[in-house]
Image: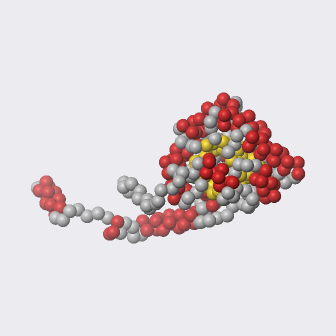
Amino acid sequence: MSFRPQELPAATPKKKVTLARLAEMRRRNLPISVLTAYDYPTGQRCELGNVDICLVGDSVAQVCLGYDKTTSLTLDEMLHHCRAVARACKTPHLVADMPFGTYHVSVADAIRNAVRLIQEGNAESVKLEGGMDVVPIVKALTTAGIPVMAHIGLMPQRAAALSGYRVQGRDAQGALLLLHAAKALQDAGAYGMVLEAIPHKLASLITDTLSIPTIGIGAGKGCSGQVLVWDDAMGNWTGHKAKFVRRFANLGEVAAQGVNDYVSAVQSREFPAEEHTYDMHTGEWEKLCSLLEEGSS
């Protein structure tokens, strides 16, 4: 790897995305773009690509660490990835998922863990999954000065309890419960809310009912913004592709071909070529040969 610092394209100074800016975008009906990032390179892409919110999602458990579910992720692992993203993401608002178990034991424990994500992870806000059951936690966190993004609908951390990854709110009673939860979470102080895998009409109703931004993932166009997982959107993930996912690039295919071409070039000795090698200063090779001859006599 080159030891030289990476050269980035010159860019005009950009205005930091703040919570006030997100609220303004909601009021002006300006769509909010949200994308996950897990390390410095993906964070840098979000920075250069003018993403509004960069989410260090607990999906890092699967797409980066090889776990089979998000609930395996620890707080220390999340902190490691959050710090890496924060080094690259200077303009987007940076929000970190609270891993499973970090806000379930007690309110005090939730505050303590959220503070770590802010202090040690350099996140600017935290996101947690839950409905009416987490309202007291959201209230306590926001009272303590920690901005919270709520997350209702399909909640991956509770997939087992929900009998899998299923669309939520498809019946009237379930939809009403989600609407009530959304209102309660807003009243508790959440600055925004992810709506995952719920019917588009319900998502639009919730968005129109609330005054805070809603971020949809599998929730239709009526939300204030949209979020996708990096590896889904960029084509790195070879696992299950949800209905709501759109591929905007095929980085996985490009990388696979690149690896194959590299191995082939090494095996055929095509690489490294002359342009990839270094020479000694003029006349120094001959001097070295003379020194070696003198030493052997």
212 sits to left or right of 292: right
- Residue 116 spot, x, y in % from top left: 57, 36
- Residue 10 spot, x, y in % from top left: 43, 61
Residue 67 in view (yes/no): no
Q: Residue at x 55, y 45 (%)?
A: 82
Q: Residue at x 65, y 55 (%)?
A: 25
Q: Quadrant of the C terminus?
A: bottom left
Residue 176 in view (yes/no): yes
- Residue 194 spot, x, y in % from top left: 71, 50
- Residue 266 spot, x, y in % from top left: 42, 65
Coloration of the structure image:
secondary structure
Above or below for 100 versus 31: above
Q: State the residue in front, 243 or 12.
A: 12
Above or below for 172 versus 185: below
Q: Quadrant of the N terminus?
A: bottom left
- Quarter-wise, where is residue 271 in the image? bottom left
Q: State the residue in front, 143 or 270.
A: 143
The total number of labels drawn is 0
Above or below for 285 versus 134: below
Q: State the residue in front, 97 or 271.
A: 97
